[in-house]
Structure formats: C-alpha cells, structure tokens
Amino acid sequence: MPMKKTRHLLPALASLASATLLAAATACGAGSSMQENPDDYPSKELDWTIAFGPGGGNDIMSRTIVDILNQEELYPADIVVENREGGSGAKGWGHLYSNSGDPYTISTTSGSFITTPLQADTGWMPGDFTHIGLFATDDTLFVTPGSSDITTWEDWVQHAEDEGKVSVGGIGTVNVDYIIQAALAEQAGYEIEYVPFNEEGQLQTALSSGSLDGIVSNPGSIMGQVESGDVNALLFTGQERLKALPDVPTGEEQGYDDLVSMPRGLILPPDAPDYAREWWIETMREVVETDAWQEYLDKNYLTADVRWGDDFTSYLDTTGTRFEKQLKEQGAL
Amino acid sequence: MDIFANLVNGIIGVLSPTTLLFLGVGVLVGMFVGAIPGLGASAGLAILLPLTFGLEPTTAIVMLAAVYYGAMYGNTITAVLINTPGDSAGVPATLEGHPLAKQGRAGPALVVAAIASFIAGTVAVVLLTITAPLMAGVASSFGPPELFLLVVIGLLTLIVLVGRNWLRGLLSVLIGFAIGTVGIDVGGGAQRYTFGSTELINGIHFIPVAIGLFGLGEVLWTLYRGGHRDGASPMRLNRRSGPFWPSRQEWRQARSPIARGTPLGFVLGVIPGAGATVASLISYSVEKGLSKRPQRFGKGAIEGMAGPESANNAAATGAMVPLLTLGIPGSASTAVLLGGFLMWGLQPGPLLMTQEPEFAWGLISSMYLGNVMLLLVSVFCIPLFAAVTRTPFRTLGPLVILLCAFGTFAVNGSVVEVGIMFACGVLGFFMRMYGLAPAATVIALVLGPIAEETLRQTLLLDGGMTLFVQRTPSLVMLFVMALVLCLPLLGTPLKRTAARVAGPSRRAGAAADAEAAEAEEDGGPESVRRQEASGGG
C-alpha cells in the first residue's frame, strides 16, 4: 500500500531535531500552493488529517476513501494520512483551519465538527471551511436489555409512561446522543433522566447490569449484541430502515422529526481555491460509485446521503442551528 | 472438549512461519515502543493499528496482541530503570522496581518482572480459555454503582501505599483530584479550569503528569542531591554473572505474590473501566499487609513488585474477556483493538467467537505463544536495557529529560502536554523535597474522575444512593471494601499464625535482619491490643 503511516513518531522525531520544523513545513505548504496552475491540480503530496484516533468511525471512513483513491489511481501523488486527535476534534480541524487556502490539506467530518465549536472556543465554526460534500450519515439505534419484555417501540413508550420517568443513557451531554434521547422523549410524551457516559464500554455494561432502561448506540458497536439477543433494537434514527434489521422501524415512520445524525463528509481548509473544490467533487462522485464504498456503508451501517458543495454547506448550516437550538432548550449550553 | 479442539486448531493456525515472524516482530517492536516513556500499550497499539489496515484479520491480531504484551513489558523496563510508569496500573511496580535498580539490582528486578508477566499472562490465558463465558457475566453486571465502589476500594488502598505520613499522603491525593477536575464535566457539559483552551477540554491526561512527576522529578531530585557528581556504579552485568539472576531468597519472596496477584488481576481486569489499576493497587497493599517486614516497602521489596506486576499482566488478559465475549472494550488498549476489529471488517459482539472461530481462537492462541516469545526476547534483551544503570548520571540525566519530552509529545503530538510534563516535573521535585507521594497523586488523577462520573451517574439513576445496597454485585463490592479496610488489622495475627506454622527455621531466617525482627516484635502486641479493643467495641 502506497499510503504512508507516520502518525506521531516521525513528527515527534522531527520536533526533536528542530522545533521550528513544524512551522516551516506548514508555511511551505501554504506558500507553494499560491503559484500553482489550476490545470495541474493535484500534483503534490496530500496531507490527510483524521481528527480522531485510529479505529474510530472517522478513522475508518478516511482510510477507506484513501484506499479507494489509491486502488482506482484517482490521486496522482502520495497521500499522507495522519491522526491528529485531541480536544474532541478541535486539534485536527484546527490544523486544517491554520492552513487556510491550502488545497493540499483535507479532512473528514463527524458529529463533533458541529458540537465541539458549540461548547468550546475553537476559534472556527463549521461554516468557515470549504465544503466538498456529504456522503453518508451515521445514525443510532435505540436498544433495551434483552432480558426485559420490552420488544417494540410501542412497548417502550407504554413502559415509560407507566414508570413516570425512565433512565436512559448515551455518550456525552453536548452530543448527538443527548439530542436524540431528548427529542424522542419529548415527541413520544414521556419523561427521561438522561445519564451521560464517557465510554461506550461503560454505557453498554450499565444497560446490561440493569442500571439503565434504554440506551442509544451506534449500530456498528451494538449490532453484535442485537444479533445475539442480548439487547432488543426498538428504533433506528436514520431515514430508511437498516438492511440488517428490516423489522426495526425508523423514527420518521413513527412520526418523529429532528432526529439528528453525524455528517460523514469531506472538507478543505477555509478559502481553498475553487478548482480544488471542483476537482474533489468530481473525484468523490467516482469514489461513492465504487463497490468498495458500498461495502463500507453496509459493514458500518451508514445511510447513504450524498450532497455536493453548496448543498453540503446548507446542510451543515441547518444541522448546526438545529443542534444549537435543541441543546439550548435542554440547558446543555 | 470443544474448547480444546478449537484451541489446538487456533495454535496450528498461528504456527505458520509468517505468523510466528509477525509475533516475534510484534513483541520486539512493542517492547521498544513501550520502553519510551509515555508510550504504553494503548499508544503503541494506536501507532501500529493503521499498519494493519487491509491485512488479513488473524495475522493482524496476532501481531497486535504481541505488541500489546511487548509494550506492557517495555513499560516495566522504563518503570524500573528511569522510574516512569507507562500507565496507572504500572505505578505500584515502580515503587519497588526503581529502588531495586538504584541498589544495582536492575537485572534481578527485570527478570522477576519478566517471569511474573510470563506466569501471570499464561495462567490468565488459561483462565480466559476456560472461564470466558462465566466472566462475561461478571463484566456485564457492573453498572455505575459497582464501578464507583470498585474505584473507592482502589482509593482506599492508597492508605497503605502512603504509609504513616497520612497527612502528606492526603495532600498528594488532593493534588491528583484537583488536576483530575480539569476538562469538560461529563455531567453537565460545562468547562472546568480549561481557560477556553481546546487543548484542555478533554482534561489533563495521566501520561504527561506521570512522566513529569516520576521521570523528570526524579532527574531534578538527583541533581539536587548532587547525583551528577557520582561516577558510574561499578556493577557488572551479563547473563552469566551473579547479579543478573535473582537470588534464591528473591525467588522465594516473589513466589506467593505472583500466585496471589494473578487471579486477582484476571478477575478485576474483566471489569470495564478501572479494573487493572485497582487490581495492581490491591495486590500491592495486600503484599505490604502480609509482609513480615513492611518497612522494606518503598525501598526495593521484590514482592511489592512481583505482585502488582503479575496483577497488571493478568488484568491485561482479563480485559480481553469482555472484548471477545461481549464486544465491549474494557480498557484503553482493548478499545483500540475493538477499532481494529471494525477496521478489518469484523462484527464485534457475543457472536464473534462462534461466527469467526478462526480469528477468536487465533487471538487466544497467539496470547499463549506471545507470552513465551516475550519471555525469550526479554531475557535476551534485559542485559542491554539494564546497561542503563551503568551509565553515569551526567550522561543519563539529560537523555532521560529528552526521552520524557519526546515520549510525551509522541503520544498526542501536543506541545501543551509537553509543557504540562515539565510543570509536573518541577511539582514532582518539590513533592519529593517535602515528602509527598507522587504515586498517590497520579493514581488519584486517574481514579478521581472515574469516581466522580460513576457517582453522579448513580445519583441520576432511579433509586440513587439506595442502589448501593439494593444490588447484589454492589453488596459484594461493599463486602470487599470492608475486607480491605480490615486488612491492616487482620494482617499481623495472620502473619503470626504463618510464622508459628512455618516453625523455627523460617523464623531464624527472618530474624537475620535484626532491625526487622525488632520492629515485628514491637508491632505485635500493639496490634493484638487493637484487635481486642475492636472486638470489645
């Protein structure tokens, strides 16, 4: 594989040799792009930032795309993939932001792309970047313990109403999980106590130990337990039913809206040249048509949702406003 | 029988020359990565995981499992030689390992650690093979109330760790708690002490603090005491010479701690969250409590290293139980492995072992072989590493500072973390000067936020505080907590019984150290009185 994997060791070595190297390197990157002929783009090494650690949803998507670009020989030069994790994505996207105008720096988005600037002073907003396109959304499954006799969404709503108040869990507070739990409870008319967790493992054992009545989880990480019957899947928040779970209804079918999802898309730094944006839109159109991409969507239970350029910008805009509004209503911001 | 057929198939699958090569490379790479301060098992795995994208899953997991083990041992090497633990579970081993190295017994300390790791690792894999479904039940019964109690038990053992200086110990723990409050509050989403910096929103990590307090703090302290004027220690070290192998007495002292630490580590390692750290802390306090001469602890007691080291390694294997049987990551390292499963296109979950037997049993088999490989590699490499103790401080000191900065930066590529590391180095120096306990600080830093999070989760749940006495698993934890609290009281009578049973010959051996024997006599009647008092009340 021609992909180079350096991660932090090499940059760290470099920093040992010279502390100024990083600054110099970024300066070069930005400077060299200025005098390029648009017809020659792309011709240089691409710096691909993953704003999260290896093995996460964002990481797997980036590596899949890079793999397809290499397999299909769509990108003529080398692609250097680096995990710049930290600050819930603030660091990776901050790196992109500091390389304004550079068409050779690129990154992928996820839910934190919208939520992190809402809760911390990142210095940038999602709208600042050059948006290439959205390819898919990552939605969640609502599950209850397999040992309980709640096996349908109607059972759950009934149970919740009988109990008066139910304990539900998810990851984080300023996050998709909380918005979904709150939106479901409000629209179905039951009361919840939302218990936030930091880690998926502890969230899942809280459910299995009987501490929580129900949780929302990413299909990729909970599907194994759905298949084995350890948990009951009641509702899927995506637009269409999951192929793997044709009997589980979607939130939309139940008449709920505002069920947000994580945008899986691609962005360039702010003020990136138009020719670079156009090149990436054309190239990614080919990528999302490949079998490898389809296989990736199926294996990771993503919903295909393709929007290019300005459509992606307006999507981010409305999603961001919705996130902010709901989090403010619920007092999380 | 099914288990053994599967296991044999797994081993046969792994025994190809290519896979063995990956196994050997993995162990070696893991060991060297782990030997860089800051780069522990989870960082090592995260660095190497992208390399396996597109590899065949079984080959990939064999190599990563080997890296996992190798890095665990690499951590021990830095813990012993330059006093820097790689993760919170490695802290107790540092307390005894480094003093041993300073006495010129780095070789024996590393050999005992390697053998403790080997025994604990192998026994734990056997336990994993046989009891995985049963232990999966233990893991899935741990909700927030139980996790909170487990963490409190871990914090209680700090009483034993800090010893008599309880006021300074308390201060050290409070410093740790204070550092632990930085970051986004998971309960409400508010920022605490981040000063708007995105670098701090996920809190201050263990790594820069531990490297600063231990590694850099030690260097500054040695400078202060004039260590740079000393020449190289005259110790000689090779595999044939005496000082390389542990003495017969050291073997004897290490035996029972390993036997106790292994099952303890395995069982607690299964619990997602803080299992490994609490296991090695409990092991340390148990060994100190049972020791005939507890005053040797902190000055290089081999049993205080063998116990926690085996608990730590057994816990690393225990953490594989929820990963394989439930698809739930129990530790930072297994979370990276879980990411790997997804990356290789596997569906983690309860059905993994039946749907992908070749992969699951390949992983388990590679753990057996990985342990053997690690023992072989480490025995060959120990003289090389132990040579560090022959290096004069004026050469070693600056190198350690460089390594500390490099290691801290390499984990997250963050300059702010390097700054935190240096600040903690200065803090560590003053903590040494005023007799505070850096070990208690880093443990509190790790356990404090988990305790806060799980307590708040428990309070949010229906039932609140009463949940602690309503749930069976949490009652078990309360019982264990009572046991830990009573251990110092029970310790002495137990020891006296043991001494009586063992007869006069062992007694004479123990009495060789006059000071120790005296202290024991002193301690005896007093604690008997205490026992009576508590019995009467």
Image (spheres, rainbow, N blue to C red):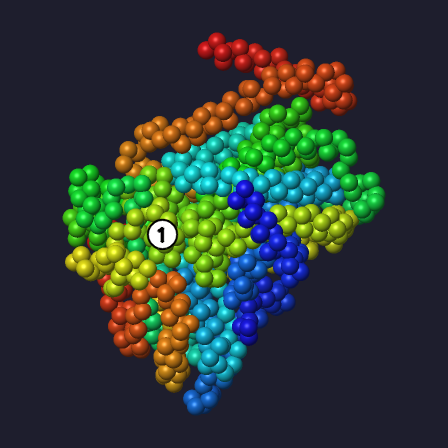
Mark 1 = which residue? A227
A27 above or below A253?
below
Mark 1 — on which chain does it sit?
Answer: A
**B130 or A252, nearer to the observer:** B130
**A3 or A290, nearer to the observer:** A290
Q: Position of residue A116 (x, y in %)?
A: 35, 60
Residue A190 visible in the displayed image: yes
Q: Position of residue B439 (x, y in %)?
A: 57, 39
Secondary structure at badge 1 equals helix
**B325 or B303, nearer to the observer:** B325
Q: In the figure, is residue B252 to the left or right of A103?
A: right
Q: Name the residue located 76 percent from the left edge and 22 percent from the top edge.
A: B509
B502 above or below A1?
above
Q: Position of residue A168 (x, y in %)?
A: 28, 45
Residue B212 visible in the displayed image: no
Q: Name the residue located 64 percent from the left edge and 16 percent from the top edge.
A: B496
Q: In the figure, is residue B351 to the left or right of B251?
A: left
Q: Quadrant of residue A162?
A: top left
Q: Name the residue located 49 percent from the left edge and 64 percent from the top edge.
A: A83
Around disc 1, counting alpha carbons within 10 Å, would you say few (fewer than 14), some (14 to 19), or many (20 or more)? some
Q: Of all residues shown, which one is farthest toward the top?
A: B536
Total marks in image = 1
In the rendered view of the protein, which quadrant contains the C terminus of chain A? Answer: bottom left
**B82 or B469, nearer to the observer:** B469
Q: Position of residue B230 (x, y in %)?
A: 78, 46
Amino acid at circle 1: Glu
Q: In the figure, is residue A255 to the left or right of B352?
A: left
In the rendered view of the protein, which quadrant contains the N terminus of chain A? Answer: bottom right
Q: Name the residue located 26 percent from the left edge and 70 percent from the top edge.
A: A315
B32 above or below B255?
below
